[in-house]
Image (spheres, helix red, strand yellow):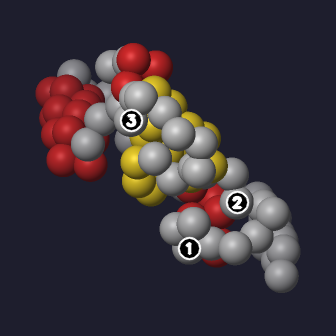
Amino acid sequence: MVYVGKNLFDKPTDEEVYCFQDAVSVVRFGILGESEDVYIQPFKKNDLGSSIITLERAVIIMQETNERYIKEGKPKLTKAKGKWKTIHTS
């Protein structure tokens, strides 16, 4: 999900409401794109919990994970083989 803004809905509220859009529709239609396939999920601050992270934190987590895998000698994923088909949705 991609953060798209606060208080985007017309309903008055005493709390700030943080709005997230599904990543697929961000790619297909843009942020807050006009389509019935755009899904916006509102969250109050208390509902966000600790699972929301910044892009900078995501990069750090991925770097730390990669370093740990290299240090532990984990094997790298091999390229998938097979007869793959591309599905065009447009």
Observer-nearest residue: 42 or 12? 12
Q: Is residue 11 left or right of residue 17?
A: right
Q: Of the residues under marks 1 and 2, which one precedes in the sequence?
A: 1
Q: Position of residue 83 (x, y in %)?
A: 81, 64
Separation of marks 3 and 1 at Cα, in angstroms? 23 Å
Q: Amino acid at mark 2?
A: Val
Pick whichever, 81 or 64, lies toward us.
64
Callout 1: few (<14), some (14-19), or many (20+) C-alpha neighbours within 10 Å?
Answer: some
Please state, as top left, top right, bottom left or bottom right, where the C terminus lies in the image.
Answer: bottom right
Q: In the shown orientation, is residue 38 left or right of residue 57?
A: right
Where disc 2 sits, the SS reads loop
Residue 78 at what x, y percent from top left?
51, 48
Instruction: Measure the alpha-carbon separation of dots 1 and 2.
Output: 9 Å
Q: Please say if the residues under marks 1 and 2 sit with CB atoms less than 8 Å apart.
A: no
Q: Residue at label 2?
A: 38
Residue appearing at x 59%, y 42% in the figure: 11
As drawn, the label of residue 30 is 1
Seen as rendered, the residue at the extreme bottom is 90
